[in-house]
Amino acid sequence: MAKVKKAPRPKAQTPKGFRDYFGHEVRERTEMLSKIAGVYHRYGFEALESSAVETVEALGKFLPDVDRPNEGVFAWQDEDDNWMALRYDLTAPLARVYAEHRNDLPLPYRRFAMGPVWRNEKPGPGRYRQFYQCDADTVGAASVAADAEICAMLADCLEELGIPRGDYLIRVNNRKVLNGVLQAMGVADEEQAAAVLRTIDKFDKVGESGVRELLGKGRLDASGAYIDGVGLAPEQAEPVLAFLTARQSVRSTYVANLSEAALQGNFDMFGRFESVVRAMLSQETGGNEAEFVPANIANIATLMLLEQIVGHSEVGKEGVQELDEIVALLMAQGYGPDRIVIDPSVVRGLGYYTGPVFEAELTFKIPDEKGRKRQFGSVAGGGRYDDLVKRFTGQVVPATGVSIGVDRLLAALREKGRVGGSETGPVVVTVMDRDRMADYQAMVAELRQAGIRAEVYLGNPKNFGNQLKYADKRHSPVAVIEGGDEKARGVVQIKDLILGAKIAENASLEEWKERPSQYEVARGDLVAKVREILEGQA
Amino acid sequence: MAKVKKAPRPKAQTPKGFRDYFGHEVRERTEMLSKIAGVYHRYGFEALESSAVETVEALGKFLPDVDRPNEGVFAWQDEDDNWMALRYDLTAPLARVYAEHRNDLPLPYRRFAMGPVWRNEKPGPGRYRQFYQCDADTVGAASVAADAEICAMLADCLEELGIPRGDYLIRVNNRKVLNGVLQAMGVADEEQAAAVLRTIDKFDKVGESGVRELLGKGRLDASGAYIDGVGLAPEQAEPVLAFLTARQSVRSTYVANLSEAALQGNFDMFGRFESVVRAMLSQETGGNEAEFVPANIANIATLMLLEQIVGHSEVGKEGVQELDEIVALLMAQGYGPDRIVIDPSVVRGLGYYTGPVFEAELTFKIPDEKGRKRQFGSVAGGGRYDDLVKRFTGQVVPATGVSIGVDRLLAALREKGRVGGSETGPVVVTVMDRDRMADYQAMVAELRQAGIRAEVYLGNPKNFGNQLKYADKRHSPVAVIEGGDEKARGVVQIKDLILGAKIAENASLEEWKERPSQYEVARGDLVAKVREILEGQA
């Protein structure tokens, strides 16, 4: 046997781009996942936990003639020299699972999945190589009812997590409408079309004038660099701009005009939307016109504008028609444009989605790393992708789904103070007499049996100060003390550490000495007194 | 750009040794983990979720001069040629986390972790390369109170999962006692000592006579192969056999004698255990001797025998002393030998544990793959390992912990019928009229708002039989039907599918025709009627 050199001490650190999650971080995520799972389940979705490891062949996206296919993924060869990799999302595994088990699965197959995914990408601040996704997808349903259902479910999820209506918005678009607009513009070249889509995706950042410049000759960006434009003529770019501003225009004047018309009973101008608008009016107002909310006509107005913009493009008209259906289905369930809005600027993943696309954004502002108040932006997104299973079976299987960025959403809710906040640790029973450990253990056993989180100090008990420091580090609400004297008298000392900390901050020496945050009770009253203090703190 | 060859269709399958988990499998595991986490939390343990990927250097166990260190783990090189690997357990990452964050963590640090681990080992029936572990460890506590606490917590976990007292047993031993026995035998050679420990580990399988043969010249195993023995002289092997049978001997006569003595007030024979036994007697009987349970003296009896067997070995005496403390601490919290028993045959992981070791076994029998009733055996185990953090920091940090084999435990509870059973799917609203999808969506929205799991059939609605087959595959309890006729009359048809299935199995044609499992109710009574049926099924 070769002699093994003594290894130097290993470095105690995670690999680059990975991190650990502690205590409340884990608990908060678990709670969030559990709430989302509850909503998914209520909608009839079934849990799926696929293996974290897939064959590179099944994951796809990789070129067969590249030796080491770990661009973007973590990959290695197994004992038979086959490449395996960690999943980079939860959708590629779903396609594999569906193709593998399709004879046993119901059709349509609604499934949800939650768990970590891994990306072999350059890490950065807040960008890790392992993060959670939380997906729901419907495989095998061609109807846009499946897309509408997912939008409604996404809204329910966000509200279940404590995000009130008005603090989020689900924006819906349709890739077919985008394609229709490109057709209407006469953009046939694939590369140019992709460039236009990328420009549309920048609308939120650079605004109308920025998009106008980028579709034309180009523009100077904030850093002073010149960004080349797509090179369209101004009249060619016009449909895109009309398209992008459809939502805004609507909000300013068009909605007002349409609302006015609807209230005056002038339904002619709604064309084929007439019945929907009539239904909406009667549903909302119950006959009382004063109840009518003009904003609720916004989605109809957007659709009417989009219809004009896509003109004679067949795919464009089909796309608008699908959005009509989605809006009608959502309205029938009570999801109006205060929650789900048609928004033409939503693009999402080029060359992946084939129909409706959607994105959930938080509309409230929170400070960024430089303290500037910013809109937090997208926390979930998805859409229809009809070609994913085809890779395996040759058959086109329609599918649509959504992915919630759990870590991002948690970060937003933490910033907003909706998650976390003050953390409470366990009751700590201190050790005054090392030989009476059994007594202290009996105390925590009693507390636990009463459902109270409790622990005995298990470090070296010699220095009592260390025990109180430990309780402090544990965010303990209460410390229990039983020295030899207390034992002899059949009592225990119970310290209210929360109140104690408050007094320590503000109290005079006299107040401090009175120690009103410490109580002596009979040993038999331990559980009752601790519970009383905890209830007072809550 | 190189031209890319068209790839053949990928195979839709998991890599060898991996599998997917569906629906109730995922839910049952999530529920189990959540219950265990609740107990761990109540004991003051904090959640930790470390990254799934570690540097090979931090994981340890690997030789620095091996090119490809993936023996037993899945490993690959990152962009800087450093080796990374998937964690193979949750303890090695804990050591790294503790060493990395020790200045911020409380001392002692109680933490729990749950999640998948990966092993690059030959897969087999029921042996997968990815499986769940669920660990709790205390780092930085040298006192055996930490070990005792973990044993109590393990018992609480099993009971929280619905395993009643009597259906499980936590067996506790101490590596120091084993070492003491080896010393008493005069086995100094390390390899021979390891061989003896391996033989002890086989006690459950081969029994007393088998161990006697294996410690001596060897034996013929069941397949007819001759297994070489350790080569000890019979008198040298005697202490091991006495040691191994300590628990059994105790159970037969020793316990009876000791109980008799205790009840007659003859405490002399308990030696230094006198006070413990007195306390036990008064605690248990409350003065009423008829209440005394002789089995409860079993742990004391085992300890007294072990003390005789280790003789003058210092380490052996220390080990027995530690077990004394554990028994006393557990008794003070009410954990007697009906739950936690001192058992000298527990060995566990050679060269890893340094003090107390423990193992939880299920004592009920369930049929194995050949239908033979077998004891299910170990579902959790752990012990004290004091050297793990030293690799990183040079300092010895005492630690003890337990790992629950979640997947194994789930399998046992499923076999026993304590988990799973009949599964209920969502209420399915069928689609009779494709154009009225909005009506059907409104129905499921109402049902969900009432907390009832519900979905609309989203496949092709043309063939109604397919919709009912789908509901069957989904284990739906109820189907809702609203055709044009029902719509016009303002009613819906509600089918009790559970009752329907029962009737279909047993009913005569007349009974079947009466269709007592289908109800027509006003559309407005949909939710109320569905709830009534679901409550009747529960």
Image (tube, coloured by chain):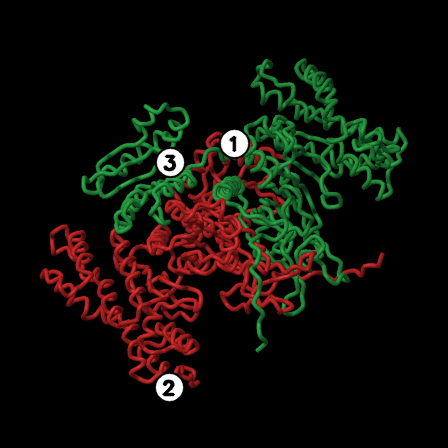
Chain colours: A red, B green
Chain ID of residue with mark 3:
B
To which residue does mark 1 refer?
B418
Q: Callout 1 environment at 10 Å: few (<14), some (14 to 19), or many (20+)?
A: few
**Image-quadrant location for residue A529:** top left
State the image coordinates of residue A282 (x, y, percent, origin top left). 15, 52
User: Disc 2 marks which residue?
Assistant: A217
Q: Farthest right residue?
A: B233
Residue A100 x, y percent position in the rendering: 53, 50
Give the residue at mark 3.
B477
Which chain's residue wears label 1? Answer: B
User: Relative to residue B416, is residue B373 drawn left or right?
Assistant: right
Helix, strand or loop for disc 1: loop
Residues indicated by labels 2 and 1 sit on the same polypeptide chain:
no
The amino acid beneath tag 3 is: Pro
Q: Could you say whether the residue bearing mark 3 is in a helix, strand or loop?
A: loop
- Residue at 42% x, 60% y is A385
**Which three-letter amino acid code belongs to the residue tagged 2?**
Lys
Whether residue A263 is visible to the viewer of this picture, yes or no, is yes
In this picture, residue B220 sits left or right of residue A16: right
Residue nearer the viewer, A180 or B60 = A180
Please state which of the two labelled residues, at mark 2 or mark 1, is closer to the viewer.
2
Decide if residue B127 is on the left or right side of residue A276: right
Q: How many marks?
A: 3
Q: In the figure, B350 relative to A395: above or below?
A: above
| Pick the front one: A48 or B278 | A48
